[in-house]
């Protein structure tokens, strides 16, 4: 009877949708003897409504993976899917539309438009798409990243941390199918970083957002559902329900193994 109940429960579980995936993804820089694989046969699935961290030593391919998945860089071989759409089959116009309508990206370098206010930068993707922000969601995002009193300031009037907060708000305000975040707390103090991570966590739990975040910080990784570890362009580990201590222990082993090695793409 117990086995029958368990089997019934499994059948009743809803199928987990895949928001994005890679199949044997390779990204090679250089040619001939100078060729170096930043990604070397990476196959991964990112489930809808999950918060995933990607970690690894410097040169492991973390940012390269994000850029290829977000259609900001092209793979040397293999496939990248967002939902059921394979990126290699899209022309430039369709790629632009996909990035605009379905993807959010938080850059390490912010990529804010210097002539626009923080408010205008945050709503820019929606403005380009001819859409207006949901006022309630805009307010929630702006308050969560602590930008309420800086909305009319231009980027040169903001600190690095404030620019990063505006960049994070821009990625989230359109409620994209998936958000890619490259070290989103890298320029924030511990309190502001915790506030942003808590908001990302709530976006997943309360709104079903899918987030893939590159980070070097075990504390940041502990906010996620899953941590994927890369080394030398390959997937070398996968940790569910991570704690900061468990992540730190894994990273120590990876750093020791990678000591003395060189690579491209963080």
Image (spheres, helix red, strand yellow):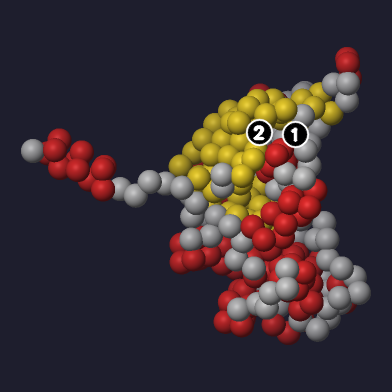
Which residue: 63% across, 27% down? 24
Residue 132 in the figure: left or right of residue 240: right
Q: Residue 228 carries which label?
A: none
Q: What element carries label 2?
A: strand
Q: In which quarter of the image is residue 254?
A: top right
Task: Tell me the crowding category of disc 1: few under 14, some 14 to 19, or many 20 or more residues within 10 angstroms, Cα based.
Answer: many
Camera sees residue 253: no
Residue 221 in the figure: left or right of residue 59: left
Hey, which residue is sitting farthest top in the picture? Answer: 33
Quadrant in which the N terminus is drawn: top left
Which residue: 79% across, 77% down? 120
As rendered, which of 43 and 156 lies closer to the eye? 43
Label 2, on which residue? 79
Quick check: 145 above or below 208? Answer: below
Residue 200 percent across, percent down from the top left: 57, 62
Q: Residue 75 carries which label?
A: 1
Camera sees residue 3: yes
Q: Quadrant of residue 130?
A: bottom right
Number of callouts: 2
Quick check: 11 above or below 43? Answer: below
Residue 252 percent across, percent down from the top left: 61, 34
As rendered, which of 117 and 158 lies closer to the eye? 117
| Separation (CA) of disc 2 from disc 1 | 8 Å
Residue 265 percent across, percent down from the top left: 78, 36
Disc 2 + disc 1, Cβ < 8 Å: yes
As rendered, which of 129 and 29 lies closer to the eye? 129
Q: Is mark 1 on a helix, strand or loop?
A: loop
Task: Tell me the crowding category of disc 2: few under 14, some 14 to 19, or many 20 or more residues within 10 angstroms, Cα based.
Answer: many
Quadrant in which the C terminus is drawn: top right
Which residue: 81% across, 24% down? 36
Residue 54 percent across, percent down from the top left: 62, 42
């Amino acid at each position: 009877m117990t086995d029958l109940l368990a089997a019934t429960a499994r059948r009743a579980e809803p199928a987990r949708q895949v928001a994005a995936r890679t199949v044997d993804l390779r990204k090679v820089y250089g040619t001939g003897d100078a060729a170096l694989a930043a990604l070397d046969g990476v196959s991964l699935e990112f489930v809808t409504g999950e918060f995933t961290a990607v970690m690894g030593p410097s040169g492991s391919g973390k940012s390269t993976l994000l850029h290829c998945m977000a259609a900001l860089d092209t793979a040397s071989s293999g496939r990248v899917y967002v939902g059921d759409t394979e990126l290699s089959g899209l022309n430039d116009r369709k790629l632009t539309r996909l990035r605009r309508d379905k993807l959010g990206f938080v850059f390490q370098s912010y990529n804010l438009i210097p002539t626009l206010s923080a408010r205008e930068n945050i709503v820019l993707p929606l403005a380009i798409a001819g859409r207006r922000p949901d006022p309630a969601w805009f307010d929630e995002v702006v308050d969560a990243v602590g930008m309420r009193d800086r909305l009319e300031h231009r980027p040169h009037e903001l600190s690095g941390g404030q620019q990063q907060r505006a960049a994070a708000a821009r990625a989230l305000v359109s409620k994209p199918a998936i958000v890619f975040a490259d070290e989103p707390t890298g320029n924030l103090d511990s309190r502001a970083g915790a506030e942003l991570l808590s908001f990302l966590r709530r976006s997943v739990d309360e709104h079903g957002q899918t987030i893939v975040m590159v980070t070097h910080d075990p504390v940041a990784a502990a906010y996620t559902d899953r941590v994927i570890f890369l080394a030398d362009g390959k997937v070398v580990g996968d940790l569910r329900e991570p704690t900061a201590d468990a992540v730190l222990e894994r990273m120590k082993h990876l750093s020791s193994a990678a000591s003395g090695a060189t690579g491209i793409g963080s």
